[in-house]
Image: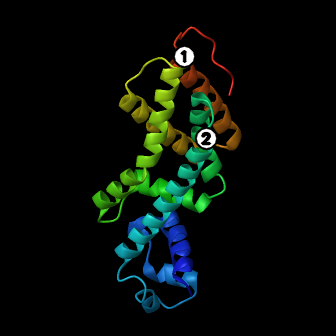
Amino acid sequence: MSKTRILAEARTVFGRKGYAEASLREIAQAVGIKTPSLYAHFPSKEALFHAVYLDVVVEHAAYFDELANAANSLPPLERLHLLLKGVEDYYRERRDLAEFSLRAAVAEYSPDGGGLRRVFLDSESRLSNAVRQAHNDGVASGEFALHDPEAFTALFFALMDGLFLQLTHYDPDLYRERFRLTWRYFSSLLSPTSAAAPEEG
């Protein structure tokens, strides 16, 4: 038995049932151990949930940090497109993570919900900087119209969150069509001349 295995099984159970309905007994059964053995690693269900949440946040942040670094040499609009497309690329192959993240985002938090929210917001700081930099570079090059960088970054994250919810609710073909239309409209808003026809994405 390993801590990694416990976290993986706990992620699945918490994602499927939620914090309130999930039990340590069920998680222990999934791992293949007796419930008391869990306490050698985690003193409570809340502590286990917190550890799973932190694990998910670290994995999510690492993926998008790497994506932002890979996109850094691209033109600003392509950078933003790659980051938005990363929502599908990341979660499509991580169904257990998507289920857990969906519950944590819209259904519930553990008793320490406020603390977990702060952890997630802190993890977004590097991605926020990458989005803000893409905006500033686009404005400096004349590719983008001037916007308030903070408002633009907030809008971009709201768009990412909306795409995540759509990804978890609709079949892949419908999601991709909605992504295409959303990106087409969003990119047209960035143009210094809003009448310019947006590129297909």
Label ID, residue 74: none
How far across and down, in percent of the image, does residue 183 sit?
59, 28
Say above or below: 128 vs 15: above
Q: Is residue 155 left or right of residue 186?
A: left
How far across and down, in percent of the image, does residue 179 sit?
62, 33
Q: Residue at x 60, y 45 (%)?
A: 86
Give the SS element for disc 1. Answer: loop
Q: Residue at x 51, y 13 (%)?
A: 192
Q: Is residue 8 left or right of residue 197?
A: left
Mark 2 surroundings within 10 Å by alpha-carbon count, few (fewer than 14), some (14 through 19), many (20 or more): some
What's the distance in space between the residues labelled 1 and 2, CA to CA? 20 Å
Give the SS element for disc 2. Answer: helix
Mark nearer the viewer, 1 or 2? 2
How far across and down, in percent of the image, does residue 152 sit?
42, 29
Residue 169 in view of the camera: no
Label ID, residue 191: 1
Say above or below: 24 vs 123: below
Which quarter of the rendered picture does the N terminus lie within? bottom right
| Residue type at numbered disc 1 | Ser
Quarter of the figure with residue 182: top right
Which quarter of the rendered picture does the C terminus lie within? top right
How far across and down, in percent of the image, does residue 53 sit?
43, 64
Which residue position is annotated with label 2?
A: 71
Q: Residue at x 39, y 69 (%)?
A: 50
The residue nearer to you, when weighing 16 against 8, is 8
Q: Earlier in the sequence, mark 1 or mark 2?
A: 2
Residue 82 in view of the camera: yes
Say above or below: 16 vs 60: below
| Residue type at numbered disc 2 | Ala
Mark 1 surroundings within 10 Å by alpha-carbon count, few (fewer than 14), some (14 through 19), many (20 or more): many
